[in-house]
Amino acid sequence: MVELEQEVERRQRLGPESAARKALIASSYHPARPEVYDSLQDAALAPEFLAAAEYSVSPGADLKGLLQRLETVSGEKRIYRVPVFTAPFCQALLEELEHFEQSDMPKGRPNTMNNYGVLLHELGLDEPLMTPLRERFLQPLMALLYPDCGGGRLDSHRAFVVKYALGQDLELGCHYDNAELTLNVALGKVFTGGALYFGGLFQAPTALTEPLEVEHVVGQGVLHRGGQLHGARPLGTGERWNLVVWLRASAVRNRLCPMCHREPDLVDDEGFSDGFTREEPTTVDVCALT
């Protein structure tokens, strides 16, 4: 009971503490690559990603047509891959992230499993980069790929970069995400090992039977359902930086929390927080188990 109360108190502190870090960073941090903070431009995005997003909003667009513009990693698990960012943009973003990492600015942990990385909303990259990426490009794709998981009703996100290096985090245990859908983009640098592996959905009793391994390709993003069990194999050499975007649809999670699979009991918090809303958007069917 004491541990539960401590965890509740810890979670209640997360929002105010994050807001305080964001305010200090905004007032005191000097970026190395200020152009990264400009509004997202098409030039930062891979041609294949632009083409897939453009097709998704075209008249008569359907799943079959979209899949011709993506790599299907697993049709059974509904895992897909597509180039997302250009190599120059990946390099510029990495230089900025490393500059921030080496600064004396306060840094929040990306999540409860990763110790090294950056919360992009604290760095000020949500508004210029992540929100337009979700609204203009990801939502049209996800609406066709995952209509049963709220793909067409994405209204918030949590975006962070994770870093793996020798002497720091090397691997990531099997887990599922606090998200309806997830985008995972390899930013760099040079590394061996660290492949993603996928099992079934977390609700399935044979979830980790014959996991599927997916190698990282710099600039390319892997799309999957948040409830898909997955993890990362140990890093062999070098450094690996990945951008992870948890995409959330309150129309789904307001009915059923993706973590405990129960109806949520809400408390007020800062910003997008965990993606729930007190207002009731049009509901969609909860993501199917198959």
Image (cartoon, rainbow, N blue to C red):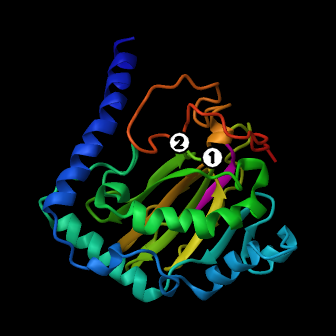
Is residue 102 in the magenta section?
no
Q: Percent position (x, y) of residue 42?
A: 53, 83
Q: Is 258 left or right of 102, judged from the image as shown? A: right
* Label 1 packing within 10 angstroms: few (<14), some (14-19), many (20+): many
Residue 145 locus on image (x, y percent): 76, 62
Q: Is residue 231 above or below residue 89?
A: above
- Residue 143: percent from the left, percent from the top? 74, 60
State the residue at coordinates (76%, 42%): 284
Q: Element at badge 2?
A: loop
- Whether 87 is drawn above or below 12: the answer is below
Residue 257: image quadrant is: top right
Q: Which of 35 and 214 is in front in this view?
A: 35
Q: In this view, does 22 lie to the left or right of 12?
A: left
Residue situated furthest top in the rendering: 1
Q: Which mark is residue 249?
A: 1
Counting from the top left corner in percent of width and height, residue 219 is at: 50, 79
Identified at 32% across, 61% down, the residue is: 124
User: Label 2 belongs to which residue?
Assistant: 275
Q: In 3D space, how far apart are the residues under numbered discs 1 and 2 (Cα atoms)?
A: 7 Å
User: What residue is shown at x 72% (from left), y 76% (from top)?
Assistant: 71
Name the residue type under label 2: Gly
Instruction: Give the position of the N terminus as an image quadrant.
Output: top left
Name above or below for residue 59 compared with residue 15: below
Judged left or right of residue 229, residue 73 is right
Instruction: Please state which amino acid type lies under the numbered disc 1.
Output: Ala
Which mark sits nearer the N-terminus, 1 or 2? Answer: 1
Per the picture, the main secondary structure of the magenta-coloured stretch is strand
Question: Is there a contact, CB below 8 Å, between mark 1 and mark 2?
Answer: yes
Which is more toward the observer, 290 or 253? 253
Which residue is nearer to you in this view: 237 or 105? 105
Which residues fall within the magenta stretch?
196-201
